[in-house]
Image (spheres, rainbow, N blue to C red):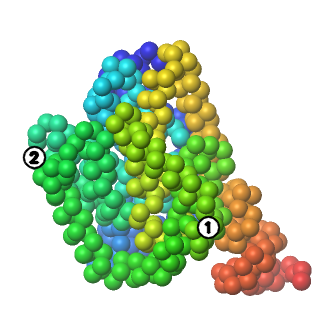
Amino acid sequence: MRALHTETPATALLWLTLAVFIGYANALGGAFQFDDYNVIVNEAQVHSWGNWLAGLDNGIRPLLKLSYTLNWTLGAGVTGFHLTNLLIHLANAWLIYRLAQIFTRQQWQQSKLQHVPLIVALLFALHPIHTEAVSYISGRSASLMALFYLAGLLSYITGRLQGDWRLIYLFTPLLFMLALATKETAVTFPLALLAWELCCGGRWRTWLSQMWPSWAMLGIAVLFFLLNDNYAAQMQRSAEFNDLQGNLATQLAGFAWLMQQWLLPLWLNIDPDLPLLTDITAALLPLCLFIAATATMLLCWRRRPWISFALFWAMLQLIPLYLFLPRLDIANERQMYLAGWPLFLALVIELSLRTAPRAFRITVAALLLIFASLTFLRNQVYADEIRLWQDTAAKSPHKARVHNNLGHAYLLAQRHEEARNEFITALQLDPGLLRARHNLYRTDDEMEKAGGTLRP
């Protein structure tokens, strides 16, 4: 731990590299899973550069698809996709290290916080909640967007500190645009700049004079999304999904669930069974949690700005966008990939200020060891589709889609009897799930051709 206190940028990068590749060493052999088939394996647009260019006119997330095309055309197979995900994760850990450095240097307790940035980055690198964004290949949408998002934030802050107009007015909006081209949820970026300014002594005048390029880029992006038929259709479907009160209740419940997963990542779940709520009275406990978090944020704004920054950032990333444009999947753990890093910052700063040095070292070492072990164990679940959906079905036993996906994995493995049982379970839970009914007919057909017997 003493080595972490006096680290140079080179040694910090070495520590982060070791952490990422030790924690995720067993992820490199994982198979394509679930959405990977829809967006990569069976998606012709990412199989050649000509197809990628031809799909730019009517496609979405062009930069994400570009990264898939690069991996596919390099011919390194699924291992190449996984290695790219690990490199993106490493780059994000490095960006968080740099951001934490700048943040702690702007606090009056900075002399006590010199060891904080690397520990924050190591906790980010090893926390098991990030496996969905790293080990699951399609989770790259979250990690690659975070790469440009965090790089844009670092560009803005560095430009402010160094007085470099190119970083503020050119590179920051450019990186914001790249984040938007990877995943639309990057629209929160200008508000993230504002959160940083307010928690680091910035003034409203700064918002007007130096953030305007990012707000202008946001305006251009909104117009593009509204005028693009694919984006507009998706937004229209989302807007019809629930009313505003139901969205609020549902998103508050999702926020509470994600914070629980971050705090206690013992039951990670790629497809949680979270209910669609229609009334705020159904989410009273999450509402109380949100009110308490908001009150804490306001009370800590001056004396402990790292706590205010962490809570404001997490709420910004997890609630407002989905409040107006809800999703069918209420919450995914990959949402915490960008939302959670200031929580690590607040946690480590508080531990550093409130505990004796020896207790601090023991606590940090224990957290890193626990996180690394849980990440390694979670990666084993991503080894193949059957193992992934068996694990998910055990944690979401009442969700029809989960049983359908497990049945499909069995069907691909020619385990027809097990597949049939899962499709029947899915239809018992949701008789209107057409995919499960189609898969059941397909399974029965394959069993008859193989000379098998069908149970009623």
The crowd level at tag 2 (other Cα within 10 Å; few <14, some 14-19, many 20+) is some
Residue 271 sits in quarter: bottom right
- Which quadrant of the structure image shows residue 400? bottom right
What is the x, y in percent for residue 154?
26, 43
Residue assigned mark 2: 165
Q: Are marks 1 and 2 in contact (CB under 8 Å)?
A: no
The amino acid at mark 2 is Trp
Give amino acid for label 1: Thr
The residue at the point 66 percent across, 71 percent down is 401
- Asked if residue 213 lies left or right of residue 395, the reply is left
The reply to whether residue 69 is visible in this rendering is no
Q: Residues within 10 Å of mark 1 (few under 14, many from 20)?
A: few
The front one of 150 and 25 is: 150
Q: Which residue is mark 1?
A: 281
Q: Earlier in the sequence, mark 1 or mark 2?
A: 2
Give the side of residue 358 with respect to residue 410, left or right. left
